[in-house]
């Protein structure tokens, strides 16, 4: 292990200290959240982020639902609202979604509501509008966050995907909230839905992905969409494609399947300023970085594709960045750590101490 990859000695018991419904750790410049995804009771695990980007375990909050204890094949199990007021989490085993109010020094449980389907794996929010992706029955369903901090289902908001057994991975709104996007791993489709003023969706557009096994995605500036392509996990075959998203949900390809030269690219992050995109390579223990041009074109930052290294057999999955855009975090599923990296001005990643002690099966990552 290199000198950069020294684990912070945080035990699982330290991570799981805190009350069942309210966690108020000491205020910090920021925080990173993951979830235990435990079948006996899912929990949000909270890490304080220091000014230098290092993490310290700061307690937990119960979601009120249950996890699966294993992988979800997803991106977006946890998400923060754009204004930073709300944190949402899926409970894949109990078919519901949890809402938390984000405070300066912690998070507070607010509500629990049915996901509108079976096995929710991804959730997205724009203003007060929430949509949940239910992988068990291939559909999305909508809710509203009420002024009193509750989740209310939207009648007539449930829509199916392209068929059954699609292997959906992620749901997310475009930054302006006008279009909802879903990736389907098993069919190689990307679904888009126009979002009406009442929060309901128009019929889906089912569009072919440029590369095989579209998985995670993120948005950049000027309606740009960046999608990872795992290519079925084939060795060193994964890639990222970029598209422009029109208001009607149609997609125009900008960069087609730009290789990572790594295996099983799955989760995607775009930095706050929109200059760089990163994807975690679960099969290679690495993170690939790309420069983004004005039109959304992609260029690999490091010829090998190894812009950051999480370690052999570390299986990095989710990615998140601090709200100041200075730090990138990875959930390393096989070694039960959160990796930490400083983002340099040219997009290179400098490894920092990793935070350990996560339970097996942890899923989802969000940061502020």
Image: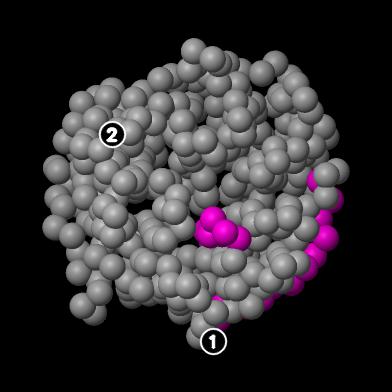
Q: Which mark is residue 303?
A: 1
Q: Which mark is residue 209?
A: none
Compared with 138, 73 (above or below) is below
Which residues, given as a range, are shown in magenta? 249-274
| Closest to the observer, 130 or 341 | 341
Give the SS element for disc 2: loop
Q: Residue 363 at x, y = what percent?
A: 40, 47
Q: Which mark is residue 105?
A: 2
Give the SS element for disc 1: loop
Compared with 64, 356 (above or below) is below
* Mark 2 to mark 1 CA distance (whole Å): 41 Å
Q: Crowdedness of circle 1 by 10 Å Cα count: few (<14), some, many (20+)?
A: few
- Name the quadrant containing residue 319: bottom left
| Closest to the observer, 124 or 207 | 124
Q: Residue 306 at x, y = what percent?
A: 46, 79
Image position of 66 (left or right of 127): left
- Visible residue check, residue 336: no
- Visible residue check, residue 260: yes
| Closest to the observer, 231 or 242 | 242
Q: Residue 311 at x, y = what percent?
A: 32, 73
**Residue drawn 18% across the image and 60% down it:** 8
Q: Crowdedness of circle 2 by 10 Å Cα count: few (<14), some, many (20+)?
A: some
Q: Is the Cβ of the residue at disc 2 closer than 8 Å to that at disc 1?
A: no
**Residue drawn 47% across the image and 36% down it:** 84
């Amino acid at each position: 292990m290199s000198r950069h990859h020294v684990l912070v000695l945080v035990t699982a018991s330290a991570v799981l200290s805190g009350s069942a419904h309210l966690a108020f750790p000491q205020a910090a410049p920021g925080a990173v959240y993951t979830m235990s995804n435990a079948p006996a009771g899912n929990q949000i695990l909270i890490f304080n982020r220091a000014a230098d980007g290092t993490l310290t375990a700061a307690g937990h909050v119960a979601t009120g639902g249950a996890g699966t204890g294993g992988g979800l094949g997803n991106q977006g199990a946890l998400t923060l609202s754009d204004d930073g007021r709300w944190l949402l989490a899926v409970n894949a085993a109990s078919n519901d979604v949890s809402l938390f109010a984000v405070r300066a020094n912690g998070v507070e449980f607010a509500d629990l509501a049915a996901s509108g389907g079976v096995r929710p794996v991804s959730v997205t929010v724009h203003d007060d509008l929430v949509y949940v992706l239910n992988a068990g029955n291939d559909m999305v369903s909508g809710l509203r966050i009420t002024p009193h901090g509750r989740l209310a289902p939207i009648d007539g908001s449930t829509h199916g995907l392209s068929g059954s057994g699609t292997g959906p991975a992620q749901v997310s709104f475009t930054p302006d909230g006008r279009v909802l996007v879903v990736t389907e791993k098993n069919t190689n489709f990307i679904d888009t839905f126009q979002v009406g003023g009442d929060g309901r969706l128009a019929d889906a557009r089912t569009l072919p992905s440029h590369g095989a096994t579209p998985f995670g995605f993120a948005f950049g500036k000027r309606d740009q969409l960046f999608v990872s392509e795992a290519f079925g996990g084939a060795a060193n075959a994964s890639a990222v494609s970029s598209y422009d998203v029109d208001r009607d949900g149609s997609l125009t390809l900008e960069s087609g399947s730009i290789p990572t030269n790594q295996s099983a690219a799955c989760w995607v992050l775009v930095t706050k300023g929109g200059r760089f995109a990163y994807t975690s390579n679960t099969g290679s223990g690495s993170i690939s970085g790309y420069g983004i041009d004005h039109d959304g074109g992609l260029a690999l930052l490091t010829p090998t594709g190894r812009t950051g290294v999480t370690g052999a057999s570390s299986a990095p999955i989710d990615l998140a960045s601090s709200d100041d855009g200075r730090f990138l975090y990875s959930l390393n599923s096989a070694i039960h750590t959160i990796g930490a990296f400083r983002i340099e001005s040219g997009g290179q990643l400098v490894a920092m101490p990793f935070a350990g002690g996560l339970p097996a099966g942890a899923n989802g990552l969000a940061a502020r």
